C-alpha cells in the first residue's frame, strides 16, 4: 500500500523533472556548484580580505583595520621585489627548459615510436607521479649532498665536486625534474592530434623537414606547449618545499615568504597580501595562454 | 635599505630596475629614511606603511591579568588537561605515570614555533588550552597580551629546589607575580667537526671567518641576531652592548650588518635539528651553532663532533609551563606543575630531550638514568656557567632602564627576513 503511494510520488517528481529540463540541471549541478562556491571561491575571498588587515606587532593578534600597508610593504621593499623577480625568473627558466626537453620527447612518442615503445615511455613518465613528492625531493638531496651520488659519479670521470647542494641551481634542477611530466603529456596530445595529411601536404608542396616543423608542426603544437607551461609555471611559482629542502641561503621564493609569515611569524595578513602576487601573475599568464589557444588543448 | 637593494639588486638587471623604482616609491611614501627597519616588515605589518606607528613596550604596559585571583589550594583534578607543547615534551615515559597518579588525561597539541604558541594562546587559550611550554622569546608576548594566568607558587613546592635564576626569572615573572613554572633550559653551543678543527675553537669568530666560507650553518631564527650582538658585545666594546636582547638602533644595525656579512659563508640556515645533523654527517658543513641535542645525537652515532660554549658566552633558551588565562582545568594544571618540577621527572625530561633541568636535585636521578648525563648537560655546573648564558627573552621597545629606545621583536623578524636572509 505505502509502496504504491511512494511510487506514485516518485512518478510525479519524475514527470515534473522531465517537463522542466532546467530543474534537472539545477538538481544535478547545485551540490558541486555549492561546494565550489563555498570551499573555493569563498575561501579565496576571505584570503583577499585578510590581505588588507593588520597584525599587532607585539601580541600578533589580527586587527581588522583596513589599509594597504601590507601591499605597500611588498612593493616598497627591495628584498621582496627581488624575491618576486627571482621566483618569476625561476618559473620562466623551468618552463622553458621543460618545454625544450618535452617537445622532441613528445614528438618522438606521438609520431615515431612503435606502440609498445610508446606505452613503455608513458609508464616511465607517469611512474614518478605515483611516488611521494617528498621522497623525490629527499632523494635529490642525497644525490646532491657532499660525496653523494653526483660527486661520486663526477669523481669516476675525474671531475671535481659539484658543490650543487643548497644552491639555486639545485632548486632549478629539481623543479625541472618534478614538473616535466606535466609538460610532456599536453605536448604529446597536441602532437598526436596533428593530422598526418597536413605534414604530407607540406612535404608535397616542397617543404623540407625544418620548414614543415616550423610552419606546420610547431604552430599546431603550440597550444599544447602553452597548456603544459601553465602547469610548470604555476607549480614553480607556488612551491616552497623544494627551495626549503635543497635550496641554500638565497632560496627565498614567494612560497617561502608566505610559509614563514604563516608558520613562523604568524602574520596571516601579510602572507595573504603576498599570496595575491602569484594570483595576479597567474591571472595575466592565463589571459595570455587563452589568447594562444591553450585551453582547447587541455 | 640602500645596502639591501645593493646586495640583492645586482643579481639581475630586472631586480635592479625594480629596486630602483621601489626606492623612489619608498622615498615618496614614507617619512625620514633615517628610521631603519621601516622598509620591510613581515613581522609587523603596521610599520610597513611607513607611518610612525607606536611600538608597544612595557612602559605604561601592565599585564592585564595580573590581578586575577590565584588558586589557594589544589582541589581534585578535573580529569583532563589540554597542553600546547614542543614535540618531545610530553613523552609517554612521564605522561603516563602522571595520568595514572592524578586521573588527568593529557591532550597534546604540538606547536612548531614560538609564534604558533603565541597564536594558540590567544584569548587566554580560548577556554580550550590549559598550559603552554613556551620559550623565553615568546613568554612576554603571551603575558602582556593578557593570555596567561597568575600562578600561586606556594602550591608548587619543588620550585624551592630550582636554581635561583629560575625561581622567578624575568621572562615569566613580572613584579613578583608568576605566570608559570620554569621547566628546562639549554645553551646554543658552537658545534664543529673535530676532523676539520683538531683544536677546539675558543671563539664564535669561526662563524664569521671567511676561511670557513660555505661550511657554516646557523639556525633559521630571528633571535639569531642576539648571537651576533653577544659576539659584538665582547669584540666591539665601543658599541656598548650590555644585553643582547636589548639593543638600541645602532647596536641592532651593527648586529644585523654582521649577520649580513656572515651570509655568504653560510651553507644552510637550518630549520630542524635533523637538518643540521644530516649536514654535519654528510660534510656539507663543518662548523655551526646548534643545541646539545644535535651534539649528543651525533656523538651517539660515533660522529666526530665537538661542542663548546666559547669565551664570549652563548645564548640559550629557557622554557616555561605557562598557565592560560582561561584554563578550563586549573586543578589538573597545578597537579602537572607540581609533577613536572620534581627532580625525578626533571631528570627524565633532561635525559630524553638533551637539555638542562632547572631542579638542582635532578643530577642524581639523571646519573641513574644514563651515567655521565648530569655532567654532559651541565646539570651540576656552577652558577658561573649559567651566568655565561644569555637566556632568550622577547626583545621589547622599552629597555630595562625604562627608556623607549630599544628595537622591538617585530623589527628583528623583518630585519632577519629582508636584510640578513
Image: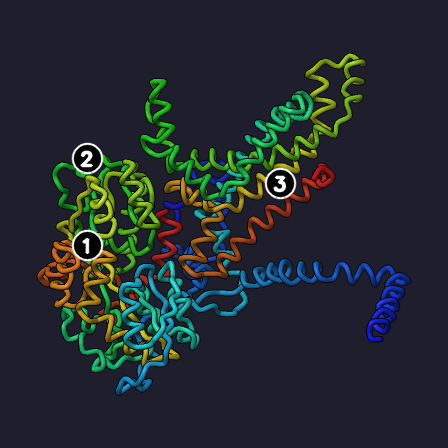
Q: CA distance from mark 2 to mark 1?
A: 22 Å
Identify which residue, B6 or B296, lies in the foreground: B296
Percent from the top left, x then y, of residue A225?
65, 33
Q: Quadrant of residue B342?
A: bottom left
Chain letter of mark 3 equals: A
Residue B146 visible in the picture: no
Label 2 or label 1, whichever lies nearer to me, is 2
Give SS at disc 3: helix
Residue drawn at (38%, 62%) of the image:
B110
Task: Determine whether B113 is above or below A297 in the image.
Answer: below
Identify which residue, B351 or B148, lies in the foreground: B351
Q: CA distance from mark 3 to mark 2?
A: 47 Å
Quarter of the N terminus of chain A within the rendering: bottom right
Q: Which residue is mark 1?
A: B314
Q: Tell me if B87 is positioned left or right of B400 in this view.
A: right
Whether label 3 touches label 1, CB < 8 Å: no
Q: Quadrant of residue B181?
A: bottom left
Q: Which residue is mark 3?
A: A230
Chain letter of mark 1 equals: B
Percent from the top left, x then y, of residue B166?
19, 69
* Both labels 3 and 1 in a single chain: no
Percent from the top left, x then y, of residue B68?
33, 85
Give SS at disc 2: loop
Percent from the top left, x then y, of residue B303?
21, 40
Residue B22 visible in the picture: yes
Identify which residue, B103 or B298, lies in the foreground: B103
Q: Which residue is mark 2?
A: B196
Amino acid at each position: 500500500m505505502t509502496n504504491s503511494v511512494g511510487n506514485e510520488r516518485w512518478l510525479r517528481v519524475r514527470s515534473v523533472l522531465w517537463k522542466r529540463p532546467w530543474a534537472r540541471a539545477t538538481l544535478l549541478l547545485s551540490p558541486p556548484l555549492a561546494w565550489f562556491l563555498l570551499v573555493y571561491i569563498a575561501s579565496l575571498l576571505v584570503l583577499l580580505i585578510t590581505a588588507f588587515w593588520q597584525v599587532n606587532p607585539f601580541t600578533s593578534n589580527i586587527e581588522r583595520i583596513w589599509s594597504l600597508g601590507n601591499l605597500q610593504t611588498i612593493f616598497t621593499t627591495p628584498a621582496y621585489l627581488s624575491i618576486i623577480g627571482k621566483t618569476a625568473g625561476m618559473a620562466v627558466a623551468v618552463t622553458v627548459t621543460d618545454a625544450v626537453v618535452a617537445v622532441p620527447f613528445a614528438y618522438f612518442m606521438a609520431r615515431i615510436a612503435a606502440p609498445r615503445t610508446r606505452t613503455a615511455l608513458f609508464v616511465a613518465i607517469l611512474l614518478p607521479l605515483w611516488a611521494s613528492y617528498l621522497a623525490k625531493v629527499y632523494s635529490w638531496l642525497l644525490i646532491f649532498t657532499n660525496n653523494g651520488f653526483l660527486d661520486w659519479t663526477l669523481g669516476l670521470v675525474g671531475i671535481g665536486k659539484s658543490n650543487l647542494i643548497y644552491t639555486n641551481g639545485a632548486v632549478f634542477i629539481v623543479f625541472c625534474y618534478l614538473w616535466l611530466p606535466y609538460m610532456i603529456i599536453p605536448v604529446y596530445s597536441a602532437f598526436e592530434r596533428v593530422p598526418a595529411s597536413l605534414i604530407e601536404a607540406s612535404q608535397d608542396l616542397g617543404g623540407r623537414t625544418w620548414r614543415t616543423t616550423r610552419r606546420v608542426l610547431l604552430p599546431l603544437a603550440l597550444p599544447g606547449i602553452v597548456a603544459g607551461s601553465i602547469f610548470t609555471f604555476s607549480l614553480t611559482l607556488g612551491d616552497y618545499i623544494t627551495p626549503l629542502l635543497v635550496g641554500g641561503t638565497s632560496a627565498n621564493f614567494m612560497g617561502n615568504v608566505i610559509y614563514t609569515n604563516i608558520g613562523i611569524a604568524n602574520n596571516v595578513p601579510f602572507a595573504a597580501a603576498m599570496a595575491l602576487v602569484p594570483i595576479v601573475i597567474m591571472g595575466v599568464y592565463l589571459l595570455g595562454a587563452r589568447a594562444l589557444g591553450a585551453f582547447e588543448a587541455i | 635599505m640602500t645596502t639591501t637593494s645593493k646586495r640583492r639588486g645586482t643579481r639581475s638587471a630586472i631586480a635592479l630596475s625594480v629596486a630602483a623604482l621601489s626606492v623612489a616609491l619608498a622615498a615618496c611614501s614614507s617619512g625620514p629614511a633615517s628610521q631603519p627597519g621601516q622598509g620591510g616588515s613581515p613581522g609587523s605589518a603596521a610599520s610597513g606603511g611607513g607611518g610612525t606607528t607606536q611600538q608597544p613596550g612595557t612602559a605604561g604596559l601592565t599585564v592585564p591579568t595580573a590581578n586575577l585571583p590565584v588558586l589557594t589550594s589544589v582541589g581534585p583534578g578535573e580529569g583532563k588537561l589540554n597542553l600546547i607543547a614542543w614535540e618531545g615534551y610530553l613523552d609517554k615515559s612521564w605522561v603516563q605515570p602522571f595520568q595514572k597518579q592524578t586521573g588527568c588525561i593529557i591532550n597534546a597539541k604540538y606547536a612548531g614555533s614560538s609564534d604558533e604558541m603565541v597564536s594558540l594562546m590567544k584569548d587566554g587559550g580560548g577556554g580550550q588550552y590549559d598550559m603552554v611550554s613556551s620559550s623565553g622569546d615568546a613568554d612576554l608576548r603571551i603575558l602582556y597580551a593578557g593570555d596567561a594566568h597568575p600562578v600561586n607558587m606556594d602550591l608548587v613546592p619543588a620550585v624551592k629546589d630550582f636554581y635561583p635564576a629560575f625561581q622567578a626569572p624575568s621572562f615569566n615573572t613580572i613584579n613578583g607575580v608568576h605566570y608559570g613554572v620554569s621547566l628546562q633550559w639549554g645553551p646554543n653551543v658552537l658545534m664543529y667537526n673535530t676532523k676539520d678543527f683538531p683544536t677546539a675553537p675558543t671563539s664564535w669568530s669561526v662563524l664569521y671567518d671567511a676561511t670557513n666560507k660555505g661550511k657554516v650553518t646557523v639556525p633559521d631564527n630571528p633571535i639569531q641576531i642576539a648571537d651576533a650582538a653577544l659576539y659584538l658585545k665582547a669584540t666591539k666594546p665601543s658599541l656598548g652592548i650590555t644585553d643582547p636582547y636589548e639593543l638600541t638602533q645602532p647596536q641592532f644595525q651593527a648586529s644585523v650588518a654582521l649577520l649580513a656579512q656572515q651570509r655568504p659563508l653560510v651553507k644552510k640556515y637550518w630549520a630542524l635539528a635533523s637538518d643540521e645533523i644530516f649536514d654535519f654527517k654528510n660534510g656539507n658543513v663543518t662548523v655551526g651553532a646548534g643545541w646539545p641535542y644535535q651534539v649528543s645525537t651525533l656523538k651517539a652515532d660515533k660522529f666526530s663532533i665537538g661542542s663548546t660554549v666559547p669565551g664570549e658566552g652563548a645564548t640559550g633558551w629557557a622554557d616555561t609551563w605557562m598557565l592560560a588565562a582561561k584554563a578550563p582545568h586549573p586543578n589538573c594544571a597545578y597537579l602537572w606543575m607540581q609533577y613536572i618540577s620534581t627532580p625525578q621527572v626533571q631528570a627524565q625530561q633532561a635525559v630524553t630531550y638533551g637539555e638542562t633541568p632547572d631542579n638542582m636535585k635532578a643530577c642524581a636521578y639523571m646519573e641513574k638514568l644514563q651515567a655521565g648525563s648530569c655532567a654532559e648537560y651541565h646539570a651540576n655546573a656552577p652558577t658561573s656557567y649559567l651566568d655565561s648564558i644569555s637566556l632568550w627573552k622577547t626583545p621589547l621597545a622599552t629597555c630595562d632602564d625604562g627608556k623607549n629606545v630599544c628595537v622591538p621583536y617585530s623589527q628583528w623578524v623583518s630585519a632577519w627576513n629582508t636584510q640578513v636572509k
